Amino acid sequence: MTGGVTDSAGKQIRVFLVDDHEVVRRGVAALLETEDDMTVVGEAGTAEQALSRIPVVLPDVAVLDVRLPGGSGVQVCRDIRSGHPEIACLMLTSFADEDALYDAVMAGAAGYVLKQIHGADLVGAVRTVAAGGSLLDSGSTGAMMERLRGGQSEPDPLAELTPQERQILDLIGEGMTNRQIGERLYLAEKTVKNYVSALLSKLDLKRRTQAAVLVAELRGRRY
């Protein structure tokens, strides 16, 4: 597919679309390609097609339906981010599924929005994740974040964490496993596991998925 003219900086956002409904893909493609700074470089209708085509074209952003034939957009996100962490994944779904949101954040997704989103907001979401930002649909995350916090307001939820624990929390937010974190920080996997247990206890969380969602909520702040 061809896109519009490049922007004043000569930089276009290259987008790959993954959805099992051709009408949805065509609609999103038509929307994005009206923007001067965006071009759709490929499409896929299944998880298998996405995993074979995305590494070839190397888009800046992959817009992924959560539910796909032969797999899930979340798994596609995890696999793509594992091999190509520079590709931002934006999950687009019809369902406000809290478990899917947890999984998407753990897989390294930069954004999770509902298909009911307005066209201009979707364009903005693509730009946000392409620039390295994080975007989670407030309607999907509001109640979940309230539950994670236990309904209490914390001025600084990370105040008790050590610098090392904060760094590990950031990497959890990127979807890294304990082994990957250990390789990044030159720590033994068992040591990382101990750090994770300690920071979860300090944050009063039970699962690392909850920690990942907390990171997504706080991302953009300096802590």
Image (cartoon, helix red, strand yellow):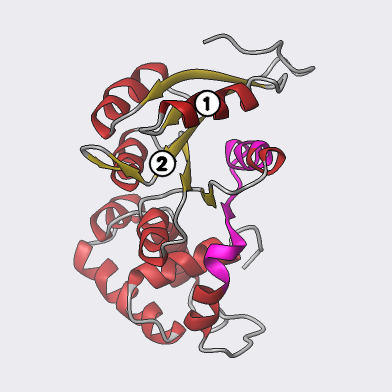
Pinpoint residue 218: horizontal percent, then vertical percent. 59, 66
Pinpoint residue 158: horizontal percent, then vertical percent. 55, 78
Name the kind of residue labelled 1 in the image: Val
Point out which mark residue 15 bears: 1
Q: Quadrant of residue 85?
A: top left
Left or right: residue 78 compared with residue 162: left
Neighbor class of circle 1 (other Cα within 10 Å; few <14, some 14-19, many 20+) is many
- Can residue 16 be seen here? The reply is no
Pinpoint residue 56: horizontal percent, then vertical percent. 35, 17
Q: Is residue 45 above or below residue 66?
A: above
Point out which mark residue 146 bears: none
Left or right: residue 28 compared with residue 185: right
Instruction: Work out whether residue 147 or residue 60 is closer to the camera in this orientation and state it.
Output: 147
Neighbor class of circle 2 (other Cα within 10 Å; few <14, some 14-19, many 20+) is many
**Residue at position x 42%, y 53% in the image:** 174
Q: Residue furthest right?
A: 8
Q: Is residue 50 magenta?
A: no
Q: Is residue 126 magenta?
A: yes
Instruction: Work out whether residue 136 or residue 160 is closer to the camera in this orientation and state it.
Output: 136
Q: Is residue 209 above or below residue 93?
A: below
Disc 2 is placed on an element classified as strand
Q: Contact (CB < 8 A) between labels 2 and 1?
A: no
**Which numbered disc, 2 or 1, marks the residue that appears first in the sequence?**
1
Left or right: residue 195 compared with residue 91: left
Quarter the C terminus occupies: bottom right
Residue stretch rendered in magenta on the structure? 123-142
Name the kind of residue labelled 2 in the image: Asp
Give the residue pinned by disc 2.
Answer: 65
* Secondary structure mostly seen in the magenta stretch: helix
Q: Quadrant of residue 168?
A: bottom left
Pinpoint residue 27: horizontal percent, then vertical percent. 56, 27
- Can residue 180 be seen here? The reply is yes
